[in-house]
Image (spheres, helix red, strand yellow):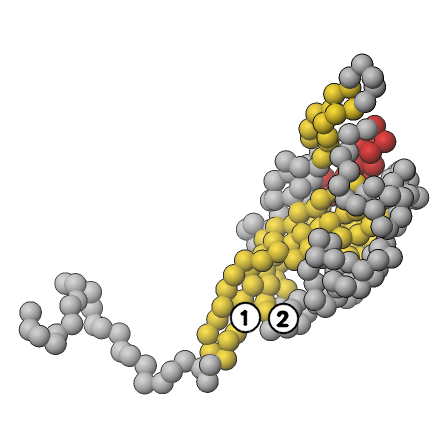
């Protein structure tokens, strides 16, 4: 070995040339979730179509009369992937939230531990279907019961001698299985929404309001101009 000579493993081949110019841009990759929530007040939901991912944070809509907060959505602009970011969706999750009020203004901190509340949960799981809505093209994803946080009602509820319930039921334990092999590509600045549709056999929402939060899990890629 002589001073100034590069160290190269035997059989490694030629040393790749160093470019004479700096790259003009770099790609940045990362994982991020995009989510949106629909509020259903007590009443009929059979044969309805409810469009989500259309209301950004700080605005009203999707069943809410008060502004959506960070817990309900992280969209900065309704129906649009953030500018300059290509987003590939590899998973779709759906969570059913029980509200403490019959209209907007309640909290999503209620345990689904009574027959009425569990019936609301199962009603949405059994009758709801998630679909992509790309302007004029609708592509069905799957029933709510198969979307991520769905999969059935899980948990345990016990009743004591006084008749009070303890414990809680929820819609957890569902695996996030959609699009693991072939992600759905959402180009930067593309317009999209997800609709939750119900069949004609869906029962009415009873008692208090129910929230449905859909989460898209994916990778983003954007270009950083450096030259």
> What residue is pinned by disc 2?
188
Name the residue: 83% across, 28% down.
115
Residue 117 coordinates in the image, percent (x, y): 82, 34
Q: Residue furthest front?
A: 162
Whichever of labels 1 and 2 marks the residue nearer the N terminus, that label is 2
Q: Is residue 8 above or below residue 143?
A: below
Residue 118 x %, y %: 80, 32
Query: Mark 2 falls on what kind of element?
Result: loop
Say if 106 sits above or below 174 in the image.
below
Which part of the image, by quadrant, shows the N terminus? bottom left
For disc 1, the marked residue is: 222
Front in this rendered view, residue 103 or 82: 103
Q: CA distance from mark 1 to mark 2?
A: 8 Å
Q: Residue at x 77, y 58 (%)?
A: 68
- For residue 209, which numbered disc appears in the image? none
* Residue 216 in which image quadrant: bottom right
Left or right: residue 222 compared with residue 144: left
Mark 1, secondary structure of its residue: strand
Is any part of residue 216 visible from this angle? Answer: yes
Q: Is residue 186 left or right of residue 55?
A: left
Crowdedness near tag 2: few (<14), some (14–19) or many (≥20) residues, C-alpha within 10 Å? some
Give the farthest residue toward the left: 2
In which quadrant of the rendered view does residue 172 lie? top right
Identified at 80% across, 52% down, the residue is: 38
């Amino acid at each position: 070995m002589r001073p100034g000579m590069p160290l190269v493993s035997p059989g490694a081949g030629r040393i790749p040339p160093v470019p004479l110019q700096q790259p003009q841009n770099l790609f940045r990759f990362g994982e991020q979730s995009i989510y949106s929530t629909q509020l259903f007040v007590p009443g009929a939901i059979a044969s309805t179509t409810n469009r989500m991912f259309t209301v950004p944070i700080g605005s009203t809509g999707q069943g809410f009369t008060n502004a959506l907060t960070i817990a309900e959505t992280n969209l900065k602009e309704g129906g649009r992937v953030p500018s300059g970011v290509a987003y590939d969706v590899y998973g779709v999750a759906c969570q059913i939230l029980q509200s403490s009020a019959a209209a907007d203004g309640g909290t999503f901190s209620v345990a689904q531990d009574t027959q009425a509340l569990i019936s609301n949960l199962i009603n949405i799981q059994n009758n709801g279907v998630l679909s992509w809505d790309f302007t004029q093209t609708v592509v069905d994803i799957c029933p709510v019961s198969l979307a991520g946080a769905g999969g059935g009602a899980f948990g345990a509820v016990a009743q004591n001698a006084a008749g009070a319930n303890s414990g809680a039921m929820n819609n957890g334990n569902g695996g996030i299985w959609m699009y693991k092999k072939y992600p759905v590509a959402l180009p930067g600045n593309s317009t999209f929404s997800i609709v939750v549709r119900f069949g004609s056999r869906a029962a009415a929402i009873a008692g208090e309001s129910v929230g449905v939060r859909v989460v898209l899990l994916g990778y983003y890629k954007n270009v950083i101009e450096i030259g």
